[in-house]
Image (cartoon, rainbow, N blue to C red):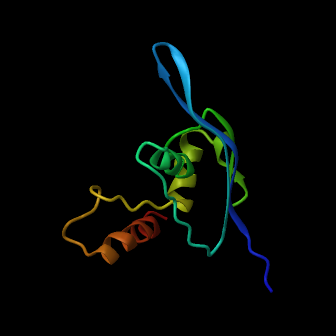
Amino acid sequence: MKEKTIAVQAKDLSIGYLQSKQRKVVQSNINLTLHSGEVTCLLGLNGAGKSTLLQILGTLSTPDGGSLVIDGIDVLSLKGKAMAEFRNRKIGFVFQQFNLFPQYTVKGNLTLAPILRAKKA
């Protein structure tokens, strides 16, 4: 049996926000391993931090602590242009309510980014 490759490894992630000049921890010790080819579902109550975790995994937000390795790259060490390039090459987003082109089908919207990336190269 072929060994699965780890695609995403999050260790001890902590998430918080400022409230009245004090840091309020929302989630801590988040550990997650996703393997290539797996389909994963993230479930939880409203306000549990699902969207925040997805923003961190998508490199749109930075956690307060912990580590995040995607395809063998420590993404929390990337800054500026390097982060933008990583996101462009490795991360894809499908938003629920916006950022889609209404003139295209779902498939058309999903295949647009690779087409544009190929034209840029």
| In-image side of 90 versus 104 (left or right) | right
Task: Check the image and name the residue furthest to the top.
Answer: 21
Q: In the drawing, does residue 81 fall left or right of residue 73?
A: left
Q: Residue furthest front?
A: 45
Name the residue located 48 percent from the left edge and 53 percent from the top edge.
Answer: 44
Q: Residue at x 59, y 46 (%)?
A: 82
Would you say residue 70 is visible in this rendering? no
Give the camera-side residue of 82 and 41: 41
**What residue lies at 49% left-to-right and 22% top-to-bottom?**
18
Hey, which residue is sitting farthest left in the picture? 103
Q: Position of residue 70 (x, y in %)?
A: 66, 56
Image vertical order of residue 13 relative to residue 90, above or below = above
Q: Nearer the viewer, residue 110 or 43?
A: 43
Please say if 99 is above or below 65.
Answer: below
Image coords of residue 86 (percent x, y): 58, 53
Task: Report if residue 19 is visible in the image.
Answer: yes
Image quarter where the N terminus lies is bottom right
The foreground one among 117 and 90 is: 90
Q: Is residue 87 left or right of residue 64?
A: left
Residue 34 quadrant: bottom right
Residue located 52% across and 52% down the image = 58
Q: Residue 3, image x and y in percent?
A: 79, 77
